[in-house]
Amino acid sequence: MSLLPHQWTYDRSRPSPWRPAATGVDTIRMQQPVGTPSGTGVVDITPLGGVGEFGMNMLALSCGETTVLIDAGVMFPEPGMPGVDLIIPDLSYLEERPTPLAALFLTHGHEDHIGAVPDIWPLLGGPIYGTRLTLALVERKLLAHGFDPTDRLVPLEPGDAIPVGPLTVQGLRVTHSMPDCLALAIDTPAGVIVHSGDFKIDHSPVDGKTIDLHRFAELGQSGVLAMFGDSTNADRPGVTGSELDVREAFEAILADAKGKVVVAVFASSLHRIQLLVDLAQQAGRQVAFVGRGVIENVEIAERLGYLRVPPDTAVHESDVMALPPQRALCIVTGSQGEPMAALSRIALDDHRHVSLQPDDVVVFSARAIPGNERAIGRVMNQIARRGAAIVSEETRHVHVSGHASQEELKLLLALVRPRYFVPIHGEYRQLAHHGRVAAALGSGETTVLTAKNGDLLRFDGQEGRLAGHVRAGRILIDGTRTGEVGDEVLRDRRHLSTDGLAIPVVAISRQDGALAGGPDIITRGLVLGALTGDVLAEAPEVVRAAVAGASVEERTDQALIGERIRTELQRFFRKRTGRRPMVVPVVMEI
């Protein structure tokens, strides 16, 4: 049974506002060359996210009245952001432009590149271009948010060239940690711009589709004005290595484990998932996919032909515990310690289908995203309590990055030979490393422009320079996307989480402002220790004194007397306990 509302298929014969039906010219697969010497036009490029940070990747490229967007990603919240589910770039710059976005080009299907597509949708006046797998993931996301993407999702395969106003955008095949990833070459009136996307140079990828280095070299020979490059691993020397490098470790784990093997991966790591499925079949183990994200991604990838799961190898998660333990492999979500993910539930013995036994082995086959270390450690401790063994990249070679290290970055730069280079997709230390790598190549032929989110970089064919700055920043989103979580709301949530809440309830006479009832003090999350009894007994007296000390005018104004009570009670709690609970007075007139 499909997990999607309907199956997305690309029908070239279907009428679409983005494809002329009668001209006989297929604008979707124009194999026109991209790569010409610098011109005399002007193009503005503005990163709106993903520079100086990991996540929220978004780049706006404008030429005349035409603006296209490259990627629309999200960032996940840090531990100190209670109630925040997602973070997206500030879209003010795009919202204030006089014309809608002409197109959105997606390099691949990771959340930090497609997660904000529903937020971009209302600003989009043209199609969304991406590979088939990327578009299938985007369609699922748009449908879940109530948008109908019919005829707005247009496949872009490696080699395809798409004309958009004065621009022509071509896809170039690259290797990454999931299939169907692209770099982009954009032919503009000012010259050719190359966007590397997320990439590494994997000469033996799981699907056999290697990065198109020949095409990058052709672009370099024709002349590239500027390149924007993935900086994730720019501070790592050497090369990243192939996805197949983890094969030996997993072969040994699957062969040696006396119980079931549970592997936690990113749900989008489809190359890793394919490798695990192949090795499970080789080892005589059956595979269960556990966790909504991995189940949905596997279904989409299998339907589109990007993943092969033999029917006799797969079992439903509800059948795992009925298998002999040495014949089971579970591929699960939760590698980052997410509290509601499958692995966390399993570790707590709270999953309805899967539980851990002493002979089981749990493998964390993913890098710990900075900020998630404590959450991952908590899950590991819970797993250890169940008696299962734990394997991570610190102990075995069970993970390899999907991003290029320094030697691979040098190779791509040497092939492309851009006049200007802008490092993106990384924190500032990675951007600085990547800039130094680029500056050291080519005997000074490449000028490095180090940007930050919101910087407007202008290229006119003769030079590239910082021409201004636009509004950029972060928007904190509640998971329902019904509204933003502003700084004040976030401060209040942090305040509540650390110091608690006190609600003084009083009744005031409407005639003379005299205290007619209460005060009652309601507290939540206020830790007072041995002082609890004394403090809660004294607090009502503080409220009475605040009311008694107010003028008649203050007492008969709910806002004024409420503020007086709040101030006096906060001062009392701070003096007696050293804490500053949030005080929310409730004043009733009778």
Image (cartoon, rainbow, N blue to C red):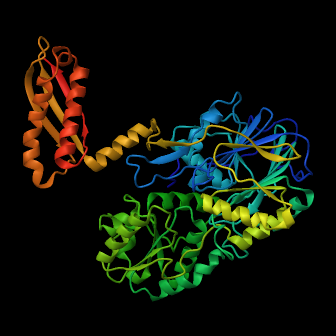
252 or 186: nearer the eye?
186
The number of numbered discs placed on residues in the rendered structure image is 0
Residue that appears at 78% across and 63% down? 439
Left or right: where does residue 390 sit relative to residue 505? right
- Quadrant housing residue 512: top left
Could you say where residue 422 lies in the image, as x and y percent from the top left? 73, 55
Q: Position of residue 382 (x, y in %)?
A: 32, 71
| Residue 303 seen | no
**Residue 275 at x, y = what percent?**
58, 75
Q: In the picture shown, does residue 143 fall above or below 373?
A: above
User: Can residue 348 be seen in the rendering of this structure?
Assistant: yes
The residue lying toward the viewer, choosing from 263 and 56, is 56
| Residue 112 locus on image (x, y percent) | 58, 53
Q: Residue furthest top?
A: 511
Residue 246 as seen in the image, left or right of residue 315? right
Q: Residue at x 51, y 74 (%)?
A: 313
**500, 268: nearer the viewer:** 500
Query: Where does the C terminus fall, quadrant-wise?
Result: top left
User: Could you say which quadrant of the image residue 116 lies in?
Assistant: top right
Q: Is residue 490 left or right of residue 31?
A: left
> Which residue is rendered at x = 11% and y = 44% of the image?
535
Closest to the observer, 379 or 325:
379
Up-down relation of residue 564 to residue 483 (above or below): above
Q: Which residue occupies 62% across, 66% down?
A: 177
Q: Does 478 sit left or right of 268 as displayed?
A: left
